[in-house]
Amino acid sequence: MLLITASLLAQHPIAAKFDLTKRRTIKGVVTRVDWSNPHVHVLVTAQEGTRTTYWAVELESQLELERSKWTRDSLKPGDAITVQGPVARDGSPQVWGDSLVLSSTGKRVLAMSPEAIAFFKPTASPTAARPTPRWPDGKPRLGPVPGETGYWARPSSSGLKESGVNVQMDEYGLLKNFGDAGKVAPFQPWARDLYVLRQSTFLKDDPMFLECYPPGALRQFQMPFGIQLLEDKSFQRIFVMNGGGNHDWHFIYTDGRAQQGANRGNADNPLFYGNAVGKWEGDTLVVDSKGFNEKFWFSNGGLPHTQQLHLVERFTRTDMNTLKYEVTIDDPGAYTRPWSSSWTLQWVAEDLPTFYCQDNRA
Amino acid sequence: MMRKIFLVVAFVSLVTQASFAQGRGGRGGGQPDTRPAPRWPDGHINLGPVPGAEMGLWDATPTSIPLARADAASDFGLFAADMSEPTDPFLAAKPKLSQIPFQPWARSLFAARVLTRQEPYTRCKPSSAARQVATAYGTQFVEVPELKIFYIVETGGAHSFRTVYMDGRSHPANLSPSSRGHSIGRWESDTLVIDTVGFNEKAWIDNLGMPTTERLHTIEKLTRTSYTQIKYEITVDDLGAYTAPWTSGFYLRWAPGESFEFVCQENNLAPQLIMGEDKIAVAPPSFVP
């Protein structure tokens, strides 16, 4: 029964927190607008019969709402509004703001615009892309060309599954049908069971959201707010910089160093991004990473991994606007054999967004 | 474990006035380093490592970070105030607390902040302005001339980065206030000048919590005065909190080494080690997630 319900409704990670089968309509007055990432909140005081109730209405991120042309002044304390949306699973007075209507005008406010929704999705390029930009030494450039700006985002697939597997999952890696879980990757039984648990609880235990942990490992290449690859040629290293998550960064070393323990040489210090060493094979940057900890989910959708995780990632900029990403996942602790996946990222010709998961934390 | 032990040592050092540079094996030896500030082939100053030479990061001595000097040791509450009278003219020119042109409310808020010490940094928040260039474990300044971008990259704290646009653009209109604001930069002779607006009022621009408002405008100047030293100056222009603009700063010291992965959220001991004790409650998120 749970599986049927989930497959019908769980189209968005809001299902992790909100029960999409229980909806409320709240008429009240805005007391505060918390205009920040990761999610904007509007606090509303309502009169329900003789009782005064206090609600937190959760919305998309500040970044997404500003992309939709809303500002922190679009809704003000004192405004009377009607809110509709699903309520929190834990019974707390929180509601996801599917719809906020301003009483004075009858108009919806703080909704995502179609343009903003489209912005974060992969697009078909209207014109042929320019060829792969190159450095004077002939190697492909992984970042912007001089005089321009841009970053990589809009993954063609943001839920991880083995190449060739035909299962449907949403942009957060949530399966359309939990019965497909065993097909997603060559899981060991415990890993499959943990994956099913994470899925069937709508990814609610995701440490990236709960703790504002870094996306880590390959998940950074599945993120809506993108990544910047800054090739620091002078020192043979690449800064991998996240637009979203906690707006953090890590190095891929391309100076030929050996992969050993942590950067400081202590092997017992597993990391969120592992120790990443890269080398060029023709036009492809091949990055080999080990030394991961088990505190994070290495992909959207909650596929388990262990400290034995070893990733080989291949980055190929096939034209100006396309980065092909191929990964081989070798983790004998969680999977019965190495397996692969791939997707593409698209070039977004504007500045990398600044988003901090921890912004509206205490 | 090494990193966690190091983390403890370094946070304790924040309190005990030990220098990061000493802890990280700075050049030491007591011999002054006479190497000049390095330059790129086009002649402009290099604020980072020199290709082919030792890698390094910029460290601040923790007690030098506050943007005011204490008139009395008790001015900074439980935070150790460096009461020594500097001989260096730049440090001697740093304003004492009594010289900061506080508006009355800002002076009161400052007094409260040094007592409660709820610095956002200790809760893994991105640090702002002067605090950002002086986070633990060293800062990297990464200039990318061909992209006309300059990055200020932290190791500790939020392990994040600030983007400084060097392409001649202006600040956008209608900036949404943020902890870091919007930074644009330019070279003025051998000094990098960074102009920032668009801060929110949650931002702490130093580790004591000099109050600021959304009117805050900072002008930061980075001058590499030798191979191993950067003079960091900041003008705080915020007529919402002060009656006049004022200027302060500190030195950053070169410390050999490389940056590394640091995740504040992973095992955050800052509330105990910087703020002093467990009983300082760090409130849980008010309504997320």
Image (cartoon, coloured by chain):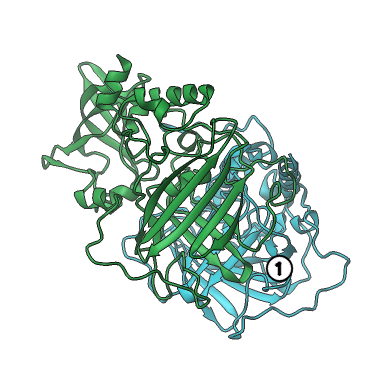
In percent of width and height, residue A231 lies at 53, 65
Read off the chain for label 1: B
- Answer left or right for B226 relative to A319: right
| Depicted A129 relative to depicted A86: above or below | below
B271, A304: nearer the viewer: A304
Residue matched to label 1: B91
Residue type, mark 1 in image: Leu
Q: Is residue B142 visible?
A: yes
Viewer-nearest residue: B161 or A292: A292
Locate the C terminus of chain B and report the quarter of the image it occupies: top left
Q: Please tell me which residue is depicted at 17% across the width and 37% down the height of the picture.
A: A101
Q: Residue at x 34, y 48 (%)?
A: A156
| Quarter residue A22 falls in | top left
Name the side, left or right, on which B274 lies relative to B164: right
| Colour of chain A in the image | green
- Colour in which chain B is drawn: cyan
- Residue lying at 66% horizontally and 75% vertically, measured from the top left: B224
On the image, the x and y values in percent for residue B123 come to 56, 41
